[in-house]
Amino acid sequence: MGREILKSLIASLLLAAVILGLHQISGAERFIHPQIWTIVIFSALLGMLVVAIGHWGLTSLDAQTRTNLFLGLTVLRLIISMIFIGIVVFAGLEGKVLWVANFFAVYLFYLVFEIYTILSNLRAISTEGEKT
């Protein structure tokens, strides 16, 4: 499990480096909300939780149940993200549209990372099945 969490942490650090790089561009405040780090921290923690649960499911559940787990994790991520958006936006945030746009950019980054991780794990399982 540590390997998947490490990959998630590396993806988070890569995203943070990109955001820091974008902050160096003149006029970046027009497309990067000042609260971007709240989004990144929330997404990183949620991503690590999803990766940890996914790894548990991959190692302890049968092949028929894994698909349901991965679909459930995607829906869980979406629901938790919607709750987070609702709480933050309705709490009186300035620049709501920019914040939501930044949130979904980060959300899609983690979603692509999660799909890539799942596919690489499925390839490894498929290879093991061919050997037996």
Image (cartoon, rainbow, N blue to C red):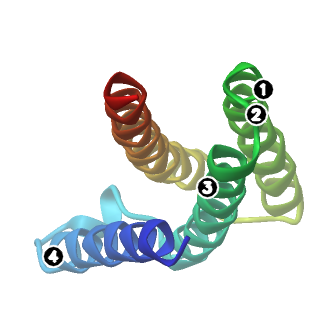
**Which comes before the other along the chain, label 1 or label 3?**
3
Judge depth for marks 2 and 1 and give the one in front. Answer: 1
Residue found 42% across the figure and 27% down from its top: 129
The picture places residue 32, in percent across and down from the top left corner, at 37, 63
Horizontal and vertical percent position of residue 23: 23, 77
Q: Secondary structure at mark 2?
A: helix
Where does label 1 land, which residue? 65
2 displayed left or right of 63: left
Q: Mark 2–mark 1 contact, CB under 8 Å? A: yes
Q: Tell me the CA gap for discs 2 and 1.
A: 6 Å
Residue type marked 4: Gly
Residue at position x 77%, y 24% from top?
Answer: 68
Q: Which residue is mark 2?
A: 69
- Residues at marks 3 and 4 touching, judged by CB atoms closer than 8 Å: no
Q: What's the distance in space between the residues labelled 3 and 4, CA to CA?
A: 32 Å
Q: Earlier in the sequence, mark 3 or mark 4?
A: 4
Give the quarter of the figure containing the N terminus. Answer: bottom right
Res. 39 image quadrant: bottom right
